Amino acid sequence: MHLSAENLAARRGEDLIFTNVSFDLSSGDALILTGRNGSGKSTLLRVVAGLLRQEKGRVVFTDSKGESDRPAGEASHYLGHRNAMKSELTVAENLAFWKTFLGDMAGGSGLNIDEAAEAVGLAGITHLPFGYLSAGQQRRFAFAKLLVAYRPIWILDEPTAALDAAADRLFVDLISSHQKSGGIVLAATHQALGLTNVREMRMTGFAGVGEGVWG
Ligand SMILES: Nc1ncnc2c1ncn2[C@@H]1O[C@H](COP(=O)(O)OP(=O)(O)OP(=O)(O)O)[C@@H](O)[C@H]1O
C-alpha cells in the first residue's frame, strides 16, 4: 500500500499557501509535518483527506490491487482540530454513529465501542454525554473514532493537543501499533511525539518544504 503526493500546490482564498509538495509513504510509514503557525500543515492534511481541492498536483492511493480510483480520503481517517462528536449524545451513541456511518474498509476491522473506550483508557464512562467530559477526555474519545472503523491511512491534525503526558504516550502507542499492522500515518504536530519509523517534513509556507528525520 502506498500514499503519495505529487507536486501539490494549494490555495486558501487568494493566497497560494504552498507549491511543489511531494511525498511517498508505504505501509508502516509515518510522516510528521512541522512548521510555524500558518505554514500550511492543516491545509496539506485537508487536501490529502479530500476535504479541500488542490490547486495543482495529485494525491495517489495505491492498494494491494494497484493504483486505486478511490480517492485517498476514502481510505483515511481524518482527525482535525475539532472532535466531530455531538455534545448532547452520549459517548457510546457518538461512537456507534461513526462505527455504522464509516464501516470497515477491506483489510481490517474496527473495535467495538467498549474495546475502543478501553483502548483510550476511558472504559466505564461511555454512558455520559460527550459534552460533560473534560477537554482531554473528549480528545481521547475523538481518537477512539479511529479505532471503531478500519481505515489504512490516519490523517491527524495536532492529535495530542489538550492531552496530559499519559494520554500522549497512549496515543503514541496506538499510532505505533497502527503502523506495525501496516497502516500509514500523516500527522501535523508541534511536539516530537516519540514515534519510530518516522520522517519529518518541515512546511515553510510558499518557500517550499525541508526534509529531516525523527525517531
Ligand atoms: N478558510 C480559509 N480562508 C483563507 N485563508 C485561510 C483559510 N484557512 C486557513 N487560511 C490561511 O492558510 C494559511 C495556512 O493555514 P494552515 O491552517 O494550513 O496552517 P498550519 O500550518 O496548520 O497552522 P497552525 O500551526 O497554526 O495550525 C494561513 O495563512 C491561514 O491564514
Image (spheres, rainbow, N blue to C red):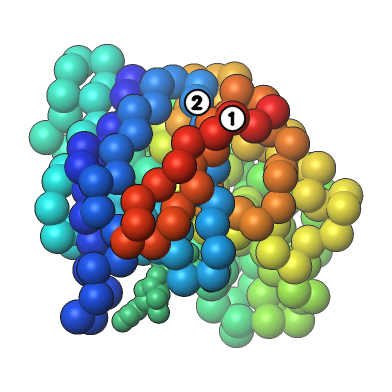
Q: Which residue is mark 1?
A: 213
Considering only vertical position in the picture, is 180 above or below 73?
above
Q: Secondary structure at mark 2?
A: loop
**Quarter of image, ligand 1:** bottom left
Name the quarter where the N terminus is drawn.
top left
User: Dot 2 corresponds to which residue?
Assistant: 29
Q: Position of 177 compared to 51: left or right?
A: right
The Cα atoms of the two marked residues, 2 and 1, are separated by 12 Å
Specify the quadrant that holds the C terminus. top right
Q: Is residue 46 above or below residue 8?
A: below
Categorize mark 2 by other alpha carbons within 10 Å: few (<14), some (14-19), many (20+): many
Location of residue 150 in the rendering, given as x and y in whole percent from the top left corner: 46, 37
Disc 2 residue lies near ligand 1 with CB under 8 A: no
Camera-side residue of 57 and 139? 57
Q: Secondary structure at mark 1?
A: strand
Residue 40: x, y in percent? 40, 63
Image position of 47 (left or right of 84): left
Q: Which mark is residue 176?
A: none
Which picture quadrant has residue 112?
Answer: top right
Task: Say which amino acid is labelled 2.
Answer: Asp
Q: Is residue 29 above or below residue 204?
A: above
Front in this rendered view, residue 106 or 3: 3
